[in-house]
Amino acid sequence: MTTLTPTSETLGQRVLHGLGGFAKARETGILLALVVVVVAATARNPGFVFSADGFRDLLLTPSILLLVAVGQAIVIITRNVDLSVGSTVGLTAYLTGRLFIDVPDIPVPLVFLAGILLGGFLGLVNGALVAFAKVPALVITLGTLYAYRGINVLWAGSDRINASDMPKEFLGLGTAQILYIPVLTLIAVFVLVVAGWYLRTQRGGRELYAIGSDPAAAHLYGLKVTQRVLTAFILCGALAGLAGVLFVARYGTVNSQVGSGYELTAVGAAVIGGVAIFGGSGTVWGAAIGAYLLFTINRALPILGVQDFWQRAVVGVLIISAIVLDRVLAVRSTRKLVEARDN
Amino acid sequence: MAEPRTYKDYSRPLWRRVLLTREMAVIAALVLVWIWAYTQVPYFAAPITLTYLLLDIAPILLMALPMTLIIITGEIDLSVASVVGLSSVLLGTLHQGGMPIELAAIIAIVVGALAGALNGFLITVVGLPSLAVTIGSLALYRGLAVGLLGTTAVTDFTAAWKDFAKSKLFGTPIPTIILIFVILAVAFAVLLHFTPFGRGVYAIGLSPEAARFSGVNVERTKFILFVLSGAVAALAGIYFTLRFGSARGDNATGMELGVIAAVLLGGVSIFGGRGGLHGVIAAVILIGALSSALRLASVTSDVINIITGALLIASVVSTSVLAWVRRKRIRPGGRKTGSLAAAKG
Amino acid sequence: MFHTKARAGAVTAITVAVALLATGCAAATPGGGDAGGDGDANLAITFVPKNLGNAYFDTSDAGGEEAIKEFGGTYDEQAPATGSPDGQVSFINTLTQQGVGGLAVSANDPTAICDALNEARDAGVKVVTFDSDTDAECRDIFINQATAEGIAKIQVDLITEQIGDAGQIAILSATANATNQNLWIDLMKEELEANHPDVELVEVVYGDDDDQTSFDKTAALLQTYPELKGIVSPTTVGIAAAARYLSTSEFKGKVALTGLGTPNQMRDYIEDETVTAFALWNPADLGYLAAYAAKALIEGDITGAEGDEFEAGKLGSFTVGENGTVLLGDPYTFNADNIADFNF
C-alpha cells in the first residue's frame, strides 16, 4: 500500500489554485457573458449603467426572478423540477395585495411572512406528492401549475389590484435604495448568499447534491432522501412566495396572470447558469447570474438596436448553447478521469 | 396427484386484461362525463357543441399522437406549442408576402419537421437530455415566431381556406379536420402496434440498453419521432391559424402542457414503456368535453384549469398509491422497499 | 386483481366526483348562461371586452350593466385574460351556443373574430361593437366614443403643448392589432406631419394592455432614447403604468406623459405633477349606450341602417350614422383643475 504524504501548499499556490478554479468554473463564463452584455449596452448608451435610473433598473428588475431561479436551482439539483413556481408567484402576489386591502394597517413584515408561508405551503404540497407518492416532479408540478393558477384566477376573478390600493411605504420598498443599491436587490442577494452557503457548507445542502447525483446510492447510503426532497420543494415554494411579495412592491398592480411563464424562465436561468438538468451539480450562484443575464439581455437588446421581440430567441439559443457546452465539458472531464484512472 | 397447472391458471382472463386497464378507466370516465353533460348541462346536447368541442381540441389531438410515442420512449418534447406558433407565423408572413396558402403550408410543415430534426439531433447525436433541449427549443422557436412578427397578427386569410378549416363533413357536426386526425391516428396506431418500429418504441422505453442489444436503432427511432412531432405540430399550427384566421407569434402559448397533461392522463407512463393511443385520445376528448360542458354551465375557465390539474395529479398519484398498497400486500409488516423505481427519471 | 380494478375505479370516481362538484359550483355561480329564451325579446346581453382586469372596461361594462338593469335584461361579462385576437373567439362561440340575445364586443382585431361574430348573427344574436370596432360586415352597430380624428388630435395637441412643440416623442400603445389603437396612431402620425414638423415620433411600443409589460416598456423607452421629451399612451392601462414608472424615476417632470387615462387611476400622478393633463370620455356612458343599442336591435326597433333612431335612457336619443356607427360625443380633457370632480 502506498503511503500518502500530505502536500502543503504555500499561500501563493493556494491563491493561484483558487483563482484557477474560479477561472475554470462554469459560473465564471456566464459572469463574463453578463459583463460583455452590460459593456456593449453601456457603450451604446452610457445611461444604461451610469444614470440613476439605469443603475437601479439594472439591479432591480432581475431581482425577483433571481429568487425564483435560486429556488428552482435547489430543486433541480435534487434531480427534480418545479413547474408550478410561476403560479405560486401569482398566488402570493395576489395574497399580498388582498392582505393590504382587506386588513388595513397590517404591518409590512407580516405580509412578507404570509407570502413566504403560503409559498412554502404550496411547495410542501408539491414536495409531499413527489416524495411520498414517488411520482416524477415533472408530472406533479405540471398538475399544480394548472391547479394553482386556476385557484388564483378563481380567487381574483377579473379583479385587479391597483398600485393605489397599496400602502405607500410598501411600494416605496420597490424603489428604495440603500447606498444606491435597491432594497429588493439586497434582499435577493442576501437570500442568495444564505442559499449558496447552505448548499456548499451545510450537510443538508451537500446531501441535496448527493441525492441528485444518484438517488439510489443516496438512499442506500442512508440519507434521508424524502426529508431532503421535501425541504428542497418547500424552499423553492417559499422563495417563489417571497418573489411574489417583492413583485407587488415593485410593480404595484396585480391581476390573475402575474407570474405566468416564470417557471420556464427560472429553469432556463438555472440551466444557463450551469445547473445540470439531471441534478447533482451546479450552484445557486450560477442560477442567479443566469437570471441576471436573461433579464439584462432583455433590457440591452433595444439599446443595441435589436427589436426586443428577438429576446426570446436569444434566450433559446443561450439555453441550448449552455447545455451543449455542459455536455462537451462533461464528456471531456469523463475522458480525463478515465485517462487518469487508466494510467 | 394434483392437476398440473397450465398457463391459464396464471394469466388473467381476457375480459380482465382488456377492461380493467388504465385506458378503460379514462374511456369510462369520458362516457360518464358525456352522459352527465348531455343530460344536465343546458345546450350541450346541441350538435353545434360537438362541432365547437372538436374544433377546439383538434390541435391537441393532433399533437398528442407523436407525443404519446415520444413519452413512451422515455423522452419528452416541450417545444411542440412553439412549433405551432412558428408555423403559424410562417403561414402568415408568407401568405402576406403573396404566396398561395398551399405552398406556404407545405413550407411551414417542412420547417416544423426541421425544428423537430434539430431537437432530435441534439438529443440523439449530441446526447443531451430531452427535457433540457426542448426547454431551450421551446424558447428558441417561440422566440423566432415572435421575432418574425412581433406582436402583430396577420389576419387576412382567404375566406375559402378559413371556411375549410371549420368545415364539417357531409352534414354531420363533425369537422373535416377530424377526418385528417383520424387518418393520422390510424397511421400512428398501426406504426405503434403493428410494426417493428413501434415495438422498438416500447422497448426503448422499458430499457434503452436492452433495446439496443436487441437490434433496435435507438437513435434513429428517437430522431424520427422528434421529426414527426415537429411536422405534426406544424400541421396543427396551420389548422389553428386558419381556424381563428389569425397568425400570431404567441399563438398556442402553453399548449404543450395541455398535450402532455392529456397524454399522461391517458395512461402513458412518464417512465416510458407503457401506454397506448386509445387512452390518450379518450383523455383529450375527456378534458375537452369537461371544458366545454363547464363553460356552457357558466363555470369559469379557471375552474377548468383546476380540474385539469387535479385530474392529472389524481390519476398519477392514484397509480402510485395503488402500487404502494400492492407492495404492502405482498410484503406486509413492511420493511421499506427500495426506491430504485423512484430513482429512474 | 385488486389494484387494476381499484385503479380503474379510482380514476372514474375522481373524475365523476370532480365533475359533479363543479356542477354544484356552477349551480351556485350566477351567470347569464341560461338565458331565458322565453318572453317576447331575449334581453340577455353579454359584454365581451378586450380582456379582463382592465379598469377601463370594468367601468364601461358597469355602465352597460346599469343600462341593462334599467330595461330589465340580463347582464353578463366574458373575456379572455389577455388581449389576443383568438382569445375572444371561444367566448363568442360559447355565447352563441347559449343563445344570448345580444353581444357588446370591444375587438382585439378587426378581422380575427369576424367569423365567430357572423356565426353568432346567423344564430340570431345581435352584435354591437364598442370602443374598438371590427370590419363593418361582422357587426350590426358600432358605438364610437368620439371621432377617431378627434381622439388623435386631442392627444397630439396635449403632448406637443407640453413639450414646447419640438423634440422626440414615443407612443406606448396597447396590443399591436387593436383596431382603435392603430387607427388613432395613424391619425396621430398624420396630424404630426401636417402641423408639428419639429416633433419627431421615434417609436411605437406595445404594452399589450398588460400592466407589467407597459411598465417595463416605459423603462426601456427612457433608456433607449435619452433625448425623449414626451410619451403618448392612448390606453388607460399604458398611461397608468407609464405614470407609475415615471413618478419614481429621474425623468419625472422632464419627460411629459399624456394620453387616454381614467381619472381615478391618474389622480395621484396629476397631484404629484408627473402628468399635467390627459384625455378620455366617460366609458360608463359608452357601455350604457352600447347596451341600449343592443336592446333596440333585439327588439327590432332598428336594424343598424343609417338614419335609424333609438332611445338610450338617460343619454337621450341617438341616430345611426354612416357605416352603422353611433357617436357618443367628444373627448374631454382632465387636469389638476377638474380631476377632483370625477369618480371612475
Image: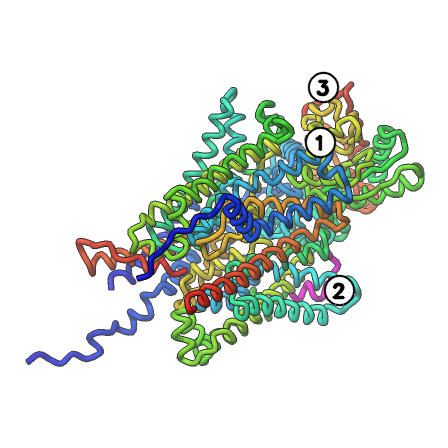
Q: Between residues A214 and C315, which one lies in front from this camera angle? A: A214
Quarter of the figure that contains the C terminus of chain B = bottom left
Q: Give coordinates of residue A295: x percent, y percent.
A: 63, 45
Rendering quarter of residue B232: bottom right
Is residue C3 visible in the rendered image? The answer is: yes
Q: Give the residue displayed 59% in from the left and 59% down from the top.
A: A320
Residues at discs 2 and 1 in contact (Cβ within 8 Å)? no
Mark 3 Cα-neighbour bin, 10 Å: few <14, some 14–19, many ≥20: few
Q: Between residues C10 and A248, which one lies in front from this camera angle? A: A248
Label 3: state its secondary structure: helix
Q: What residue range appears in magenta?
A: B154-165
Residue B304 lies left or right of residue A301; in this view the side is: left
Disc 1 chain ID: A
Q: Choose mark 2 or mark 1, whichever is in front.
A: 1
- The type of residue carrying mark 3 is Ala
How far apart are labels 3 and 1 at the CA level?
A: 33 Å
Q: Give the residue displayed 67% in from the left and 58% down from the top.
A: B144
What residue does disc 3 label? Answer: C340
Label 2: state its secondary structure: helix
Count of numbered tags: 3
Asked whether A225 falls inside the magenta stretch, the response is no
How far apart are labels 3 and 2 at the CA level?
A: 52 Å
Residue C148 lies left or right of residue B10; in this view the side is: right
